[in-house]
Amino acid sequence: MVLRNGFAQWFAAEAAGGFGLMETRPICTGVSEKRPLRRGWTTGACATAAAKAAYAALLSRQFPEAVEITLPGGLRPRFALAETALGEGFAQAGVIKDAGDDPDITHGALLRARVRPAAPGQGVVFRAGEGVGIVTRPGLPIPPGEPAINPAPRRMIAAAIAEIAAAFGAGGDVEVEISIAGGARLAERTLNPRLGIVGGLSVLGTTGVVVPYSCSAWIAGIRQGIDVARAAGFVHIAAATGRNSEAAVQRLYQLPEAALIDMGNFVGGVLNSLRRRPLPRLSLAGGIAKMTKLAQGHLDLHSARGSADLAALARLAAAGGVPAEICARMAEAASVAEAFALAADQGPALARAVASAAWRTAAEVLRGTDIDLEVLLFSHDGALLGRARGKTP
């Protein structure tokens, strides 16, 4: 079997996402433009610039016009300050996030860092301000009770604080409070509530750079969702392509919210995560169009990555017992939905055939894991059309 989106692509995409907590829901269209897409900066990079400027002002009582930071890869971007404030025992700076050409919901958000002195020997202590969430569940890189500021941004901020401390001969013991204007409202459009991050967004980014349409945040969110489910002790999780199929599989098995993974188009992200760290049981749920693409070997189910092969779907239907005259019309159909409609009078034969082929695609990725794997096809109204289940080879 040829998997049209191979392992290497998924490992590369996941590496780009690092261990970030989910903060965005990118459109991930794979848009191709004539001009090069402009890269941007992560929330972690913006928070680092704001913290560095604030600490410099805390020690010098004046703010720089712009601040330069060092990213993990060695880049040294400069950030303009959108706002500044000095008060008794604190300094605060704000940076506007520029996500470049990525469809990031935090593009244009104001990130603030307020820096206060801490007791000698404490180092850098992180606090969550308005719009930054608090971790409440195990399984994430940050323990429960801590601000949702990921390990890489914490290291970046600590390094920036140390740089300023060395320049001024200071100890570098500070409390850094990060806030994101409107973050609580924006967080409602992310997976953070499901992951147990309450009250706001996450400060994330492993490289400091936002790569347009890389979808790394979504793939990282998939991995984090699986980790949260594992930490909660769940032995059965369900990954769905959309809201309708997610609601349907949740009703079918009465699964708790934390056992549900919003995989969108990224079935490869789910499978590769479980290939490395298996859980006992996985249900993959989706509609007929997405599951048809999975049945044909696609691990990225977005329409921009290619269309379903209707001639191949017709051959699959024929193998499943659909009459030849109907299969011939299916091969000429305008869409998967039309092809399924043509075979509707044949009962569940086509849906069963698609589910079985999709199961084989997924099982090939999970080979050697001994996972109880299931593929479920649902209609738009949540009716179960077809299923296939078995242990992976």
Image: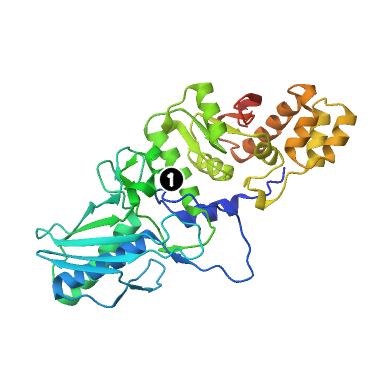
User: Would you say 28 lies left or right of 132 here?
Assistant: right
Indicate whether 40 appears above or below 150: below
Task: Examine the image and state in which quarter residue 50 appears.
Answer: bottom left
Indicate whether 234 appears above or below 50: above
Q: Position of residue 88 (x, y in %)?
A: 9, 64
Q: Position of residue 103 (x, y in %)?
A: 50, 57
Res. 333 visible in picture: yes
Outermost residue on the right side: it is 325
The residue wearing badge 1 is 189
Q: Position of residue 2 (x, y in %)?
A: 71, 46
Q: Position of residue 225 (x, y in %)?
A: 43, 40
Q: Count neighbours of disc 1 (C-alpha within 10 A) and say few if under 14, some if 14 to 19, many if 20 or more.
A: some
User: Would you say 356 lies left or right of 258 here?
Assistant: right
Task: Examine the image and state in which quarter residue 364 appears.
Answer: top right
Asked whether 246 or 296 is in front, the reply is 246
Give the residue displayed 30% in from the left and 50% down from the top.
Answer: 132
User: Would you say 114 lies left or right of 337 here?
Assistant: left
